[in-house]
Every structure is written in C-alpha cells, then in structure tokens.
Image: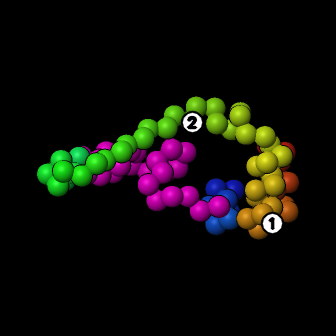
Amino acid sequence: ILTARLTKACPINTRQRGFIRSAGCSRNLKLLQLLIPNTKREHRPLGVIFIDLVKAFDTVSHSHIILALKQKGMDTHMIALITNL
C-alpha cells in the first residue's frame, strides 16, 4: 500500500531499477549495448553516467523528505506513517 501511494505521489523514472520490483538492470544494459554501436557508427558523442547512491537516504534530511512529500500532495496519514518509520 505504501509503495503504491508513494508511486502515485512521486512517480519514478521508467528506467529506474533500484528499489523497485523489476527484472533487474538487463533492460538498461541492453539499451546501452544498442547505443554504443549506433553512436560509433554515426560518429556522435555519447556520455554515460553511473551513479552509486549507497546510503542516499542517510544523507538526505528527513525533514526535506517530509517537505517533498507534502509538496507532492501526499496525504497526511501516509506522511505520518513514513515519518514514524
């Protein structure tokens, strides 16, 4: 229930693979495998970034998370549940 409501209030990018139920990162890897040869063939630049967000929630202020949920229109009951977690 919590995940469903959070996803409605704070939609995630369709390419995200962390912290969600999915087949893993195979789709993103396949996309990258297609992009590299295409950019080489077309002699175009390609930038790739891998971001490791280990302990990301330890570095974000809890008050900022709560404020963001309020700004996204999350109902007060759900915010209270998340605050108490």
Q: Secondary structure at mark 1?
A: loop
List x then y, in percent, for residue 48. Answer: 37, 43
Q: Secondary structure at mark 2?
A: loop
The label number, if any, that marks residue 40 in the structure image: none
Residue located at (24% from left, 52% from top): 44
**Residue 16 coordinates in the image, percent (x, y):** 48, 51
Is residue 39 placed above or below 60 in the rendered structure?
below
Residue 75 sits above or below residue 43 on the image = below
Q: Which residue is mark 1?
A: 75
Mark 2 neighbour density, 10 Å: few (under 14) some (14–19) many (20 or more): few
The kind of residue on which mark 1 rests is: Asp
Numbered tag placed on residue 53 in the rendering: 2
Q: Is residue 5 left or right of residue 61?
A: left
> Does residue 18 appear in this view?
yes
Q: Give the class, few, some or many, for how many residues have Cα within 10 Å of label 1's Cα (few <14, many ≥20).
A: few
Q: Amino acid at mark 2?
A: Leu
- Asked whether residue 49 is drawn in magenta, I would say no
Q: In front here: 47 or 53?
A: 47
Q: Which residues are magenta?
A: 10-35
Residue drawn 18% across the image and 50% down it: 43
